Image (spheres, rainbow, N blue to C red):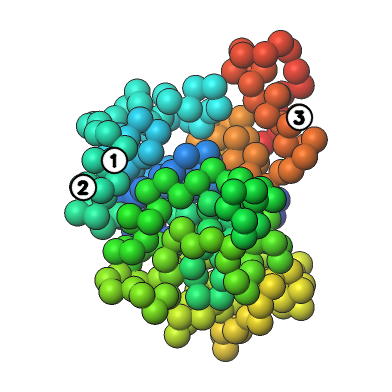
Amino acid sequence: MMADTGQPAADYTIDELIAVCIARQVRDGDHLAHGLATPLVAAGYILAQRTHAPNAYFASAVGQGVVYDWAPLGVARVEALWLGKALANASFVTLVADILHTLAPKEFFRPAQVDPHGNFNNIAIGRDYAAPRLRLPGSGGIPDVSVESSQMYMYVPRHSRAVFVPRLDFLSGMGYHPARQRGSGPVYLISDLGQFDWADGTMRLTTIHAGVTVERVQAKTGFPLAIAPDLHETPPPTQEQVRLLRDEIDPLGVRRLETLAGSARRDHLRAILASEGVLGPESPPQP
């Protein structure tokens, strides 16, 4: 993990902490893959590039482009980052099946379900595929990437027993699975409660965020958690990291959409779109 420098921030939000923890996993020169509708990941990648990893490259599912430059996050203008600044483009199938595995990119996935061994599901909730309780966005290129990758990372903005389950309804991403022949399962996960790894192929709690207890994390996890012997509190963001996120990388607060739910998420989305000139006047979103 990349060590922080600078004064710790006294005032930060959970979305900012998650973005900073994502940034800490990035190394200079990394090839980074970025999926759809994951602004927390985009914020973390750009933050890393603006601080300790200036030579990181992004490969994005938006426009299937490889990007070195960056732009502030948006919703109506999300293409400004991935399309307007692409160095090269390819079809989604070509990118996933032919290109990504040659780059060995580091990628953050957001699982709808994840089991103790890092296998995950983004297909559907409910074991009747024809009539699930909830149809999810789908696996995209996850089955192609996860069977070979050794650089799978995860994030869960809202930690719950509905996400961390003892058994998946469907398998779309391969973790530490008996059928694995190449690569490895995921190496890291950040949630709104703590950070985790997969020591010996089983999910393990390594840090807890300020104000969180081990008991709370376990109560919100649907299987027994291993606990790292050096468990400690997650280091807070620095003042400069928070300033970059709020003032330059994501002044509209798009990253917050992943930590909000229900009416709060709807209202924040409308405020962002109003600020972008897509809707009528609304109160501006708070960073």
Q: Is residue 38 left or right of residue 285?
A: left
Q: Residues within 10 Å of mark 2 (few under 14, many from 20)?
A: few
Label whose residue precedes the other's in the sequence (1 or 2): 1
Q: Are marks 2 and 3 in contact (CB under 8 Å)?
A: no
Q: Amino acid at mark 2?
A: Asp
Label whose residue precedes the other's in the sequence (3 or 1): 1
Read off the residue under disc 1: 93
Q: Secondary structure at mark 3?
A: helix
Q: Secondary structure at mark 1?
A: helix
Q: Position of residue 211 (x, y in %)?
A: 76, 67
Residue 98: assigned label: 2
Seen at 67% across and 17% down, the residue is: 274
Quarter placement of the N terminus: bottom left
Q: Is residue 196 left or right of residue 214?
A: left
- How far apart are the alpha carbons under marks 2 and 3? 40 Å
Q: Amino acid at mark 3?
A: Asp
